[in-house]
Amino acid sequence: MRGLASLAMFRAAKALAQSRDPAERARVAVVDDAGSHTYAQLLADARRVRGALGSAAAGGASVAMLMPSGYEYVAVQWGIWAAGGAVVPLSPMHPERELEYFIANSEARQVVCHPLLLASLRPVAARLGGAVELIASDTLMAAAEPGGLGDAEIDEGQNALFIYTSGTTGKPKGVVHTHASIAAQVGSLHEA
């Protein structure tokens, strides 16, 4: 199972998905309103997203995503990480001007958006003068699984996630997490 990234989370998920033990292969990664999704499904969908995004996300480039909570959110997030990108999560509850600010401030050139939320982003993209490519998430999820992709080499010090503060004293500030800081947080939660 290749075509992902050299990060510990992908290695752990691959170990489950490729286990000789059927119970391990059937381990659930995400449960949402649509049902349960295994690690094998999550990795396959992350590969699709990575292949469809191409090299535009490589090297820690910012890729924003406007998605409702659920499995597809996780699959797109993992796909951006597998492509080497840094995720800029956007909320459907953000006003247009905040969405515009987050996209511009993070220098995202691609925004993956759930099809039902695309209409809310079109005016934002227009104000940004065509500097942003809007990509429907269902297009990424339906892409053919790419063949021949090797695992992306990603440095753990590379940008992984932009989280914006509330902005109580001015405009929100983007806090950048690296893959190493996320791994440390997950490790702490796992040990607790």
Image: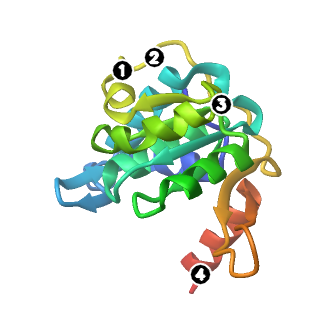
Position of residue 23 relative to residue 158, above or below, is below
CB-based contact (under 8 Å), mark 4 and mark 1: no
Distance, label 3 to label 1, CA atoms, is 17 Å
CB-based contact (under 8 Å), mark 2 and mark 3: no
- Category of crowding for the residue at label 1, using alpha-carbon neighbours closer than 10 angstroms: few (below 14), some (14–19), many (at least 20): some
For badge 3, the amino acid type reads: Ala
Query: Which picture quadrant has residue 110?
Result: top right
The tag earlier along the polypeptide, 2 or 3, is 3
For badge 4, the amino acid type reads: Glu
Residue at numbered disc 4 = 191
Query: Which picture quadrant has residue 28?
Result: bottom left
**Does any portion of residue 28 appear in the rendered image?**
no
Residue at numbered disc 1 = 143
The tag earlier along the polypeptide, 3 or 1, is 3
For badge 1, the amino acid type reads: Ala
Q: Which residue is painted at 30% across and 25% down in the image? A: 142
CB-based contact (under 8 Å), mark 2 and mark 4: no
Q: Which residue is painted at 69% across and 51% down in the image? A: 160
